[in-house]
Image: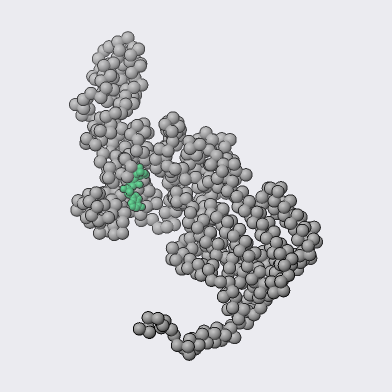
């Protein structure tokens, strides 16, 4: 995914909250930090010089702790928040320069959103909520209901069409949120901590639904989370935000194996690496011993059992074309999972 | 040290001229525009008279039946339906049917006016902090000024009759409608509004599909209060020629007819309770989705 085309490109985006953002912008560019800006000038630095390219048809995760600017960032993509300065390019258009009408059309047809607290319309049933975006587009009621019924079914809520959000559990409400967003057929899906309010089990459920749907829909998804596990599981690309700045971006493997600084290393050290690292990352040169053939993209954790069961405790690693490109032994797998210092081998990453 | 104990008053002559100036100014205004204003309100007067005649021409069992049906659809409560029927019957039985019909007609027209004027003003207030800053003090004055005081200019302008009475009642009863519409819309969940924005809703779509429906329980509380306040105002308005249950009360006060005053007063109370229970339970039913058991 990392080398596919770019769908959303953010350039030099700044957001400063307060009475006089333009004056403060100069100070920030001159090196004033978030804390100084807050203490001395009474302004909040929301985002500082954000530059990001988000892959088309991929899931871009933006991760960071509370207050790091995640919500502010995602709201610039559909301009629910006006920037202090900067550009957001989507399909060759700068969203931040659209007039009111073009912006509304953009929001209606090209980018839909799922919210942390669901933000459903409490006075409308599941069906009426799901057709909301279509109604705004101006679609006829019959057609809209047909389309909505399809998505309600896809998120597993068939039979609940006439219920009100207040009658549903959190997980079910967020399914409605997802159906409502998918129904508009926009090719960009913005998800601001969409699963953060849910219990762990239900959250995993929702992640699975999203990943399954994405396999066939190939939307460009911007997914915000403060949870590294979730980020690694969902993301094709991850950007890590701190104090309004992007401090590292890359694939899940790159983040886990080559954390850019101690801050990120601290985050990643407790992670289950077996679920992130792929065989091709840790394989050694091929030998002539036998073993099951496994895809280079298989995760270490998934390979562990197969390798354990094979007589020589090793597997042969293949590329997309099916050619053997290397081997992994059981020791390699264990070492990878046990977070040793394997960095020296990863130069090719 | 006189100036400490004697308040520095405007001289007596100046004061008289000052009052005279205002009175004269308003009289001139009345003379110039009085007729125009009167003819402006003519359709309203015709409608009020038409409604009153209609109610009086309606056979009493039919009227009670209609009220019962309305009560049932609004509240789905048998208790309220039976209560309404019995109190209406008693009112008629005790000889107050005609006055009651007059009062009902003026309350209906007044409520319609309050909704028709109050809703847009409330919406305007909710959309602009400036409008709110301007309208709020006006509402404060309308609610606190003794109602007799604003009867004076109304009577000077339009004389004694139904229309000035109606205007007085509307001025008295409209503030809660405006306030609660404004409040209801301002209280709508910011996150739901953000979602509407995110899906590209225009300001009008937001108002009609999200803000008003979600403000409806509050708006209904406003309607309810408006009805209650116009009923309370009916007695005072009868001083300037509004017919209905207020007039016998007035007569009872000046002649010390205890029973007459009490009965008509109780009839007003009965009407108030009927209107209140019906509109309140309708308002509650509007929110049933919140409790989780949708209709
Ligand atoms: N309207 C606003 N006015 C002033 N400051 C704001 C405003 N909105 C956000 N901020 C500040 O900007 C910073 C980033 O906020 P943001 O909501 O984007 O963080 P977040 O990463 O989404 O956090 P969370 O995980 O809590 O949702 C915070 O310091 C916040 O206090
Ligand atoms: Mg947030």
Q: Is residue B11 left or right of residue B161?
A: left
Q: State the residue at coordinates (63%, 75%).
A: B164
Farthest residue, direction top: A311
Q: Looking at the picture, does residue A120 appear above or below residue A311?
A: below
List x then y, in percent, for residue A200: 42, 31
Q: Looking at the picture, does residue B172 appear above or below residue A48?
A: below
Image quadrant where residue B154 sits: bottom right
Q: Return the residue nearer the eye: A243 or A256.
A: A243
Q: Is residue A62 left or right of residue B130?
A: left
List x then y, in percent, for residue B142: 53, 69
List x then y, in percent, for residue A230: 36, 33
Q: Return the residue nearer the eye: B66 or B231.
A: B231
Q: Looking at the picture, does residue B234 appear above or below residue B77?
A: below
Image quadrant where residue A261 sits: top left
List x then y, in percent, for residue A153: 54, 35
Q: State the residue at coordinates (30%, 12%).
A: A313
Q: Examine the rendering and report whether any part of residue A282 can be seen.
A: yes
Task: Report ligand 2 position as a quadrant.
Answer: top left
Q: Quadrant of the N terminus of chain A?
A: top left
Q: State the residue at coordinates (39%, 49%).
A: A78
Q: Examine the rendering and report whether any part of residue A319 can be seen.
A: no
Q: State the residue at coordinates (32%, 9%).
A: A311
């Amino acid at each position: 995914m990392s080398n596919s085309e770019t769908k959303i490109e953010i350039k030099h985006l700044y957001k400063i909250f307060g009475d006089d953002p333009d004056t403060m912008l100069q100070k920030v560019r001159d090196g004033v930090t978030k804390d100084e800006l807050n203490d001395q000038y009474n302004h909040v630095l929301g985002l500082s010089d954000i530059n990001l390219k988000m892959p088309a048809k991929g899931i871009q995760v933006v991760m960071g702790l509370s207050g790091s600017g995640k919500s502010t960032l995602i709201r610039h993509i559909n301009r629910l928040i006006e920037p202090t300065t900067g550009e957001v390019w989507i399909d060759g258009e700068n969203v931040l320069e659209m007039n009111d009408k073009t912006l509304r059309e953009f929001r209606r047809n090209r980018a839909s959103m799922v919210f942390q607290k669901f933000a459903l319309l409490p006075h409308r049933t599941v069906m009426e909520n799901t057709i909301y975006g279509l109604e705004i587009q101006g679609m006829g009621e019959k057609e809209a209901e047909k389309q909505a019924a399809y998505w309600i079914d896809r998120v597993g809520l068939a039979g609940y069409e006439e219920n009100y959000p207040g009658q549903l559990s959190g997980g079910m409400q967020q399914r409605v949120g997802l159906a409502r967003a998918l129904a508009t057929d926009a090719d960009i899906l913005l998800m601001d901590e969409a699963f953060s309010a849910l219990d762990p089990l239900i959250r995993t459920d929702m992640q699975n639904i999203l990943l399954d749907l994405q396999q066939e829909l190939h939307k460009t998804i911007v997914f915000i989370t403060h949870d590294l596990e979730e980020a690694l599981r969902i993301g094709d690309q991850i950007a890590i935000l701190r104090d309004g700045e992007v401090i590292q971006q890359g694939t899940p493997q790159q983040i886990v194996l080559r954390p850019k600084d101690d801050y990120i290393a601290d985050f990643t050290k407790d992670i289950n690496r077996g679920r992130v690292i792929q065989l091709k990352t840790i394989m050694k040169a091929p030998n002539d011993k036998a073993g099951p053939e496994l895809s280079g993209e298989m995760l270490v954790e998934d390979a562990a059992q197969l390798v354990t069961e094979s007589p020589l405790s090793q597997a042969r690693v293949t590329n997309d074309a099916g050619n053997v490109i290397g081997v992994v032994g059981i020791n390699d797998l264990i070492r990878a999972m046990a977070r040793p210092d394997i960095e020296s081998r990863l130069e090719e990453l | 040290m006189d100036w400490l104990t004697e308040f520095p008053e405007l001289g007596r002559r100046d004061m008289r001229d000052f009052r005279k100036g205002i009175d004269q100014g308003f009289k001139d205004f009345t003379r110039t525009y009085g007729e125009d204003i009167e003819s402006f309100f003519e359709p309203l007067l015709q409608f009020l008279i038409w409604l009153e005649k209609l109610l009086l021409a309606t056979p009493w069992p039919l009227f009670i039946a209609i009220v019962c049906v309305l009560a049932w659809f609004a509240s789905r409560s048998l208790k309220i339906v039976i209560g309404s029927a019995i109190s209406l019957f008693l009112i008629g039985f005790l000889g107050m049917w005609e006055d009651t019909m007059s009062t009902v007609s003026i309350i209906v027209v007044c409520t319609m006016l309050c909704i028709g004027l109050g809703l847009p003003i409330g919406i305007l207030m909710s959309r602009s902090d400036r409008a709110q800053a301007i309208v709020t003090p006006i509402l404060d004055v309308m609610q606190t000024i003794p109602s007799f005081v604003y009867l004076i200019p109304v009577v000077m302008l339009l004389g004694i009759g139904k229309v000035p009475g109606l205007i007085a009642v509307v001025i008295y009863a409209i503030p809660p409608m405006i306030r609660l519409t404004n409040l209801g819309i301002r209280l709508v969940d910011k996150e739901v509004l953000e979602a509407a924005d995110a899906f590209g809703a225009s300001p009008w779509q937001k108002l009609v599909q999200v803000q008003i429906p979600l403000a409806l329980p509050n708006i209904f509380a406003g309607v309810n209060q408006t009805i209650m306040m116009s009923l309370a105002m009916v007695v005072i308005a009868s001083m300037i020629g509004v017919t209905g249950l207020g007039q016998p009360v007035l007569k009872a006060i000046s002649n010390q007819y205890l029973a007459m005053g009490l009965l008509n007063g109780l009839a007003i109370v009965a009407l108030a309770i009927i209107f209140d229970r019906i509109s309140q339970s309708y308002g509650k039913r509007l929110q049933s989705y919140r409790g989780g058991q949708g209709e």
